[in-house]
Image (cartoon, helix red, strand yellow):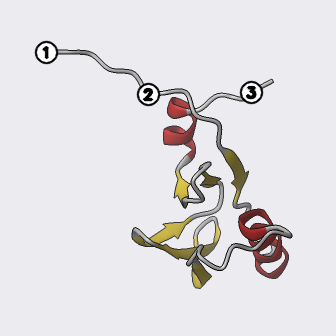
Amino acid sequence: MATYKKKYVNIEAIVWPGTNFEIDLLVLADFIWGCNRDENTKIEFGYKELGPKGPVLWLKNCNGMREVHPGDFVIKTPNGCVYPLCPESFHMSYEAVE
């Protein structure tokens, strides 16, 4: 059996705090599209429910519907894919670039 490691790739990431839904949603939208909104990036998001830690966001991209809970990271890969990761998975896969 062969062993593999994840290829080096830089990503951008932001934490969904869930403390103020309207402001947090604007910050997330700016992170996803910024001033260079790509019309080919088909992403929808909105309020799903109020969970024990705060508002749960739904994020729909080309891979389907994903829930984003307060404290989760939303990452953006170089090819424009945007998806959430729980903190544990994020920290196992990524480290800060200096």
Where does residue 48 sit, x and y in percent of width and height? 55, 83
Name the amino acid, label 3. Answer: Val
* Sequence-first tag of 3 and 2: 2
Asked if disc 1 and disc 3 are in contact, CB closer than 8 Å, the reply is no
Circle 3 residues within 10 Å: few <14, some 14–19, many ≥20: few
Task: Quickly name the residue at label 2.
Answer: 6
Residue 78 shows in the view:
yes
Asked if disc 2 and disc 1 are in contact, CB closer than 8 Å, the reply is no
Distance of label 2 from label 1 (alpha carbons): 17 Å
Foreground pick, 71 / 32: 32
Where does residue 84 sit, x and y in percent of width and height? 54, 58
Distance of label 3 from label 2 (alpha carbons): 16 Å
- Seen in the picture, residue 97 relative to 10 is either above or below; the reply is above
Name the amino acid, label 2. Answer: Lys
- Labelled disc at residue 54: none
Task: Quickly name the residue at label 1.
Answer: 1
- Labelled disc at residue 97: 3
* Residue at 58 percent of width and 68 percent of height: 52
Asked if disc 3 and disc 2 are in contact, CB closer than 8 Å, the reply is no
Foreground pick, 33 / 92: 33
Circle 2 residues within 10 Å: few <14, some 14–19, many ≥20: few
Q: SS at mark 1?
A: loop
Task: Examine the image and state in which quarter residue 82 appears.
Answer: bottom right
Name the amino acid, label 1. Answer: Met
Quadrant of the snapshot with the N terminus: top left
